[in-house]
Amino acid sequence: DSGVTQTPKHLITATGQRVTLRCSPRSGDLSVYWYQQSLDQGLQFLIQYYNGEERAKGNILERFSAQQFPDLHSELNLSSLELGDSALYFCASSVGLAGDPNEQFFGPGTRLTVL
Amino acid sequence: GENVEQHPSTLSVQEGDSAVIKCTYSDSASNYFPWYKQELGKGPQLIIDIRSNVGEKKDQRIAVTLNKTAKHFSLHITETQPEDSAVYFCAASPTTTSGTYKYIFGTGTRLKVLA
């Protein structure tokens, strides 16, 4: 158990809908990262937040957005869903000291299925 | 752009044999190289990492080597066991323009250890 929690575990929805994925980082970790893992593919970095502020962006679609709240939990919002958005979405957290890479601890993921 | 190539995509070895997975990165500013193991239905878990000021690191049956000049790093697993069967991901961590860092993951290697 990494200490990172994600809810829900599974999510099934229809095209055009909007969903929210939630992540609680490990106690004491200030950075949260979101990744997308499509079938048989690697982990694609989406976005990073550090202590409530966006710090880095990857290949995140405009239909996707995220935020990190004062209690450090984070939410990833996916809107106007398309079939191709079906994937595993992972959240990771780290201590997040700028300039010094730290181990990222991954949550169990949310499996999103868009029908 | 930033890229990490990982080979092979699948690897089958007999129990007790060694397994080697290789990665090549493109961003010379990368200074941290973690390796993650992902078991079915779970999030990735760090198994070993190496920083750019070190050429080799070992932890029991697992070792990682880094060649900064060639931008290569490799994972070596000796005396493989059936429980080593999983997908392994390498990653490189370049510094972002905001002064933080992100992981660029390889596409993964599915390792099967045959009993």
Image (tube, coloured by chain):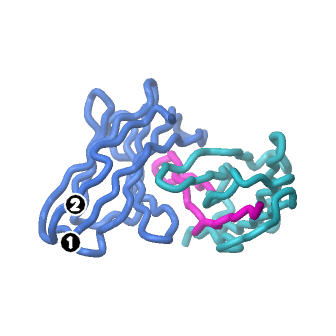
Chain colours: A blue, B cyan
Q: Residue B78's spot in the image, x, y percent?
A: 85, 53
Majority SS type along the magenta span:
loop
Residue placed most toward the observer, A8 or B29? A8
Q: Which kind of residue does numbered mark 1 sit on?
A: Leu
**In the image, which residues are magenta?**
B92-115
The extreme front residue here reads: B115
- Residue beneath the point at 29% across and 53% down: A10
**Residue B35 image offset from top left, x and y in percent:** 66, 52
Q: Is residue A73 above or below residue A109?
A: above
Q: Residues within 10 Å of mark 2 (few under 14, many from 20)?
A: few
Q: Is residue A97 above or below residue B2?
A: above
Asked if one can make out residue B89 in the rendered structure from this viewpoint, the answer is no
Label 2–label 1 contact, CB within 8 A: yes
Tag 2 secondary structure: strand
Q: Which residue is mark 2?
A: A12
Residue A87 in percent (x, y) is at 36, 64
Q: Position of residue B112 (x, y in %)?
A: 69, 64
Name the residue: 34% across, 52% down: A110
**Mark 2 to mark 1: distance in Å?**
7 Å
Label located before the other in sequence (2 or 1): 2
Residue type at mark 2: give it.
Answer: Ile
Where the C terminus of chain A falls, by quadrant?
bottom left
Q: Nearer the viewer, residue A7 or A92?
A: A7
